[in-house]
């Protein structure tokens, strides 16, 4: 680690770790969205597929309230998560796809925390104003605020996970090689 202007800067030589981190996040977020859309499709097919669908709805229930009135529907069935969650995950996949167009995968520095705070405040206001009865949120407001926070998160998580796994790899190499 180098110390530049009072800030510890982490340097590494492993070029594979950033690519692995990126592709794991990309694959995970793609599969996550496929599973969300698979639940209503499988349910509409009936039989054994309906049981598989029930498992998917159960799988997503810890991360989403799945309220019918706040969820999009396809095949006459609700999607496995509500509109806000769907757009958080869609935004996350979009941000993940856009990330290498904006930054190198070896980037370890997230953007200013201002963007994360702004996205969080917008989402929080949508929830709080609705809860207080001041402004009833809509499918549009829930979807928009979900997409905004979801699309911002990869720009913080990708460099964070890259730094973490690069440091773990460096530690393990030093531990077992030295």
Image (spheres, grey):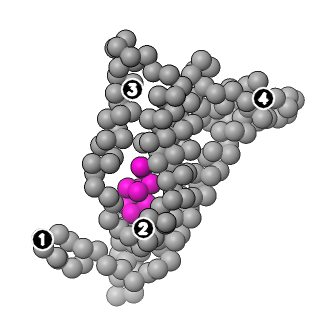
Quarter of the image for the C terminus: give it. Answer: bottom left
Which residue is the site of mark 2?
Answer: 103
In the picture, the disc for residue 87 is none
Which residue is the site of mark 1?
Answer: 6
Q: How many marks?
A: 4
Mark nearer the N terminus (1 vs 2): 1
**Name of the residue lying farthest toward the bottom:** 178
120 up-or-down from 10: above or below: above
Residue 99 image position (x, y, % from top left): 47, 61
Mark nearer the N terminus (2 vs 3): 2
Query: Residue at position x 38%, y 70% from top?
Result: 107
Gap between marks 4 and 1 measured at Cα: 57 Å
Disc 4 crowd, CA 10 A, few/some/many (<14, 14-19, 20+): few
Secondary structure, mark 2, is: loop
Gap between marks 2 and 3 measured at Cα: 30 Å
Which residue is the site of mark 3?
Answer: 126
Relative placement, left or right, of 130 versus 28 is left
* Dominant secondary structure, magenta: helix
Quarter of the image for the N terminus: give it. Answer: bottom left
Asked if residue 129 is among those painted magenta in the image, a careful observer would answer: no
Which residue is the site of mark 4?
Answer: 75
Q: Is residue 45 visible?
A: yes
Query: Residue at position x 42%, y 42% from top?
Result: 149
Secondary structure, mark 1, is: loop
Disc 1 crowd, CA 10 A, few/some/many (<14, 14-19, 20+): few
Mark nearer the N terminus (4 vs 1): 1
91 up-or-down from 57: above or below: below
Residue 11 image position (x, y, % from top left): 31, 78
The range drawn in magenta is 152-160
Which numbered mark, 1 or 3, is in the foreground of this view? Answer: 3
């Amino acid at each position: 680690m180098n110390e530049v202007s009072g800030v510890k800067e982490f340097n590494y030589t492993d070029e594979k770790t950033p690519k692995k981190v990126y592709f794991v996040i990309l694959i995970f977020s793609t599969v996550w969205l496929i599973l969300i859309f698979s639940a209503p499709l499988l349910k509409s097919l009936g039989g054994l597929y309906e049981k598989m669908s029930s498992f998917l709805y159960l799988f997503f229930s810890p991360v989403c309230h799945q309220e019918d009135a706040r969820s999009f529907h396809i095949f006459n069935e609700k999607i496995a998560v509500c509109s806000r969650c769907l757009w958080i995950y869609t935004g996350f996949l979009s941000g993940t796809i856009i990330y290498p167009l904006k930054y190198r995968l070896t980037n370890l520095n997230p953007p200013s925390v201002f963007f994360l705070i702004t996205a969080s405040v917008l989402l929080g206001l949508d929830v709080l104003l609705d809860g207080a009865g001041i402004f009833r949120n809509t499918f549009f407001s829930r979807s928009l605020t979900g997409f905004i926070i979801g699309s911002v998160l990869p720009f913080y998580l990708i460099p964070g996970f890259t730094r973490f796994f690069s440091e773990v790899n460096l530690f393990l190499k030093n531990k077992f090689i030295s």
